[in-house]
Image (spheres, rainbow, N blue to C red):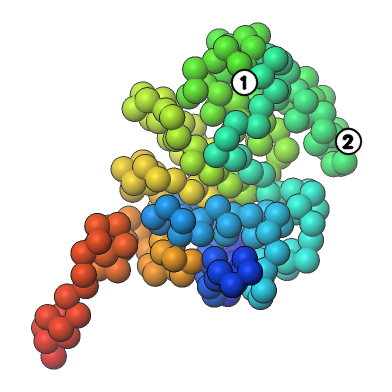
Amino acid sequence: MPLLRVEAATVRFGGLLAVSDADLDADAGAITGLIGPNGAGKTTLFNVICGLQSTVRGKVTLADENISTLRPHERARRGIARTFQRFELFGTLTTRENLLVAAEIHKKWSKDHDDPRKVADRLLDTVGLRSVAEDRVDSLPTGLARLVEIGRALAMDPNLILLDEASSGLSEEEKERVAEVLRDLAREDNLGVLLVEHDIDLVMGICERIHVLDFGQMIAHGTPAEVQADPAVQAAYLGTEEPADETAGARG
């Protein structure tokens, strides 16, 4: 049973069908990718999962529980954490303080009795930020700030983390650092990671399975190799036409 399952999610904005009958699943202990051209509906589908976007129809299941009618904070308390394309950090606070704030918020409503200060201290090592623990976040390079966002999401003790364009604005070295952290989280902490990302090389390098959206419809899913070889995916990204007649003849 997948950790997360989305079934037939459909979203309308007035007369615009933004997402149409989209199915998606993500496993614990694995990194799953969600890709597609600009405007494909990726962030909208993320918002459906988090409860920030209502649907015309569809179902969201987390750890075998139907959470479709739960509000965003209720889904967060079930174990969903999220980062956004634009930084949502406390820039005038230090790295440690950003993690501490999240850990203290989590402690207020959870049954977790861990000291928030110890949680923040542990997360500094988890995401590799010990060396900048006392630096103000608004002074950090973009790559380290992304790791602060990930660390703050982890302070909520999730079983699923949704990352929206985690590599945006990063250098190649910074991307590799983020990738290494995500691999460790999935492998060692059995965390489910769902990644919306434009950097196809990154997605193909770290994801075990990938879902592809185009014009709000899920057009492919599978391993990186399967997705790369899919004619519909190639058409969506490269503007090529599917050789329907030729392939039909070959099959015949």
The residue tagged 1 is 124
Q: Secondary structure at mark 2?
A: helix
Say whether residue 34 is visible: yes
The residue tagged 2 is 108
The answer to which of 144 and 114 lies nearer the viewer is 144
Q: Residue furthest front?
A: 15
Judge from the rendering whether residue 223 lies leftward or rightward of residue 144; answer left or right. left
Report x, y in % for residue 143: 48, 24
Label 1 CA crowd tier, 10 Å (few <14, some 14–19, many 20+): many
Report x, y in % for residue 185: 54, 38
The amino acid on which the numbered mark 1 sits, given as a three-letter code, is Leu
The answer to which of 157 and 167 lies nearer the viewer is 167
Calculate the distance from the C-alpha at mark 2 to the C-alpha at mark 1: 21 Å
Report x, y in % for residue 32: 47, 53
Q: Is residue 149 above or below residue 124?
A: below
The amino acid on which the numbered mark 2 sits, given as a three-letter code, is Lys
The mark tally for this picture is: 2
Judge from the rendering whether residue 182 lies leftward or rightward of residue 158; answer left or right. left
